Image: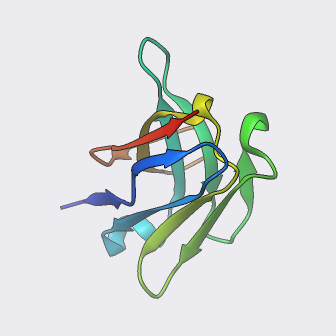
Amino acid sequence: QVQLVESGGGLVQAGGSLRLSCAASGSVFSSNVMGWYRQAPGKQRILVAAIASGGYTKYADSVKGRFTIARDNTKNTVYLQMNSLKPEDTAVYYCSAGPAWYVSDYWGQGTQVTVSS
């Protein structure tokens, strides 16, 4: 059974940092693109960052230079390091796994990130 389990969300002041983690079952992690999406209230879910099994990464323009996605293949875990957080980063963040960029077959349960001004 495929599972994606996120952790690391919370409340932080503007300018602060958080690191999200997503632990994935091995059958998903080894062959898929892993991504982080976010969804703010009343808005669509959008891609924040993604990383392929070979390490190539993509980022939304709004987070370039502030967020870093990484994967640890030994732990079947993908991370999202978020620095210089802004109130507009407030959203529920979801981990995803899929066969290609912008294609997600599996989702985590989501973790809330709230950035106060």
Is residue 101 something that shows in the picture? no
- Residue at horizontal 65 percent and vertical 37 percent from the top: 86
- Residue at horizontal 56 percent and vertical 72 percent from the top: 71
Which of the two residues, 65 or 88, is positioned nearer the viewer here? 88
Left or right: where does residue 53 sit relative to residue 73?
A: right
- Residue at horizontal 41 percent and vertical 44 percent from the top: 94
What percent of the width, then of the height, locates residue 97?
Answer: 44, 52
The single residue placed furthest to the left in the displayed view is: 1
What percent of the width, then of the height, locates residue 35?
Answer: 53, 51
The single residue placed furthest to the bottom in the displayed view is: 74
- Quarter the N terminus occupies: bottom left
Above or below 24: residue 34: above
Above or below 90: residue 14: below
The single residue placed furthest to the top in the displayed view is: 42
- Residue at horizontal 64 percent and vertical 45 percent from the top: 85
What percent of the width, then of the height, locates residue 31?
Answer: 50, 67
What percent of the width, then of the height, locates residue 112?
Answer: 36, 41
- Quarter the C terminus occupies: top right
Left or right: where does residue 33 sit relative to residue 15?
A: left
Within the image, what quadrant is residue 75 found in? bottom left
Is residue 68 something that shows in the picture? yes
Which of the two residues, 104 or 65, is positioned nearer the viewer here? 65
